[in-house]
Amino acid sequence: IMAPRMEKKNRLAEAFKENFNLLGLAGAAALSAATLNPIPLLIGVVAEAAYLIFIPDSKWFDARLEKRFDAEILAHRNKLKLEVFPRVASGVKERFVRLETIRTQVGNEDTFANETWFRQVLRKLDYLLEKFLHFARKDAEFRTHLKRVYEEVVEPPKSRDVRNDRKRRSNTGEYDLTEDSVPPTGDRWVAATVASIQNQFDAELDEVRRERAAEDDFNTQAILDKRIEVISSRHEQVGRIGKILTNLGHQMNLLEDSFGLINDQLRARSPEQVLADIDGLVYQTDAMTKMLDEMSTLGI
């Protein structure tokens, strides 16, 4: 998505696969076969050679490829939106729509339409739009997980039937992620929820440690030691989720701020400065993506 131009080999292949080119070759071959005359086919071969020499490097073909690539990117983004939007809060959707609007405004700027650097800016904005959707999905997943842990630890269901139903749905991944079940957004909810969960874990740890200190049976001590280990691990994991949610929120805010800044700077700064700014944003975004991937490998 970042490369504004294709390699020569790929451009030749794309030029060859154009419908009008394939139809022309097929027509020449059919005419030769029908008339038993090789001249139409020879003319077609010569025309094809000239076509592949000049067309792939032409500005006309550049524009055609860019238009096709834009359509592919838009189709992929719309597909991703259909996957992500049902899982995120309405406010997040509105934020993304604002970013898309800025991308459209930048893309409609005719002053730089034929500039290579400007195409690079557009490609990178498309890349960052997609990243915003990925971050929004991860944010919703972590918030939903945090909400479930809170319901389990701080506000456990009153009846055994409800508790067993929650456990079944959790194990089978059947939780509803419609708008009504999306947890609140914002750092305050994250901080308060993490603190409540960890306070409950701290209380459980204190109780188990007291039991451990008063226990004489070796086997029971081993079981209590394992409980302490498990609860401590959950305490630590909830803290990590809280931190990643905070970082995700800041990263998404940074994307929004930077989109507006880039739109402002197109006319006020040099192409090199604009590209440097957006490259810095891409680097920061990729670092965030890497951190999320690392957390996934840890089962978080």
Image (cartoon, rainbow, N blue to C red):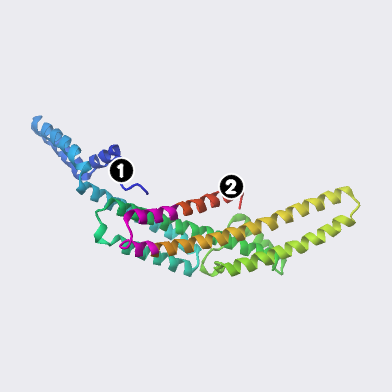
How far across and down, in percent of the image, does residue 229 sit?
A: 75, 52
- Residue 176's tag is none
Residue at coordinates 55% horizontally, 63% vertically from top-left? Answer: 176
Q: Is residue 159 left or right of residue 12?
A: right
In three-dimensional space, the C-alpha distance between marks 2 and 1, rounded to whole angstroms, equals: 34 Å
Q: Is residue 134 above or below residue 24?
A: below
Q: Residues within 10 Å of mark 1 (few under 14, many from 20)?
A: few
- The quarter holding residue 132 reads bottom left
Comparing 187 with 175, the one in front is 187
Q: Earlier in the sequence, mark 2 or mark 1?
A: 1
Above or below, 23 relative to 300: above
Query: Residue 246 versus residue 111: which sits nearer the camera?
Result: 111
Q: Is residue 196 magenta?
A: no
At mark 1, the secondary structure is loop
Q: Which residues are magenta?
A: 261-282
Q: Where 215 sits versus 197, above or below?
A: above
The three-letter code of the residue at mark 1 reads Met
Between 298 and 147, the one lying in front of the other is 298
Q: Position of residue 114 (x, y in %)?
A: 24, 54
Q: Is residue 46 left or right of residue 1?
A: left
Residue under label 1, please give it.
6
Residue, disc 2: 297
Magenta stretch: helix, strand or loop mostly: helix
* Residue 76 visible: no
Badge 2: how crowded within 10 Å, few (<14), some, or many (20+)?
few
Q: Position of residue 248 (x, y in %)?
A: 53, 60
Figure quadrant of residue 208: bottom right
Task: Identify the residue shown where x is 15% and y is 33%.
Answer: 45
**In percent of the image, x 56 and y 69: which residue is there?**
184
Query: Residue 297 appears at what percent x and percent y?
Result: 58, 47
- Mark 2 lies on a secondary structure that is helix
Kind of residue at badge 2: Thr
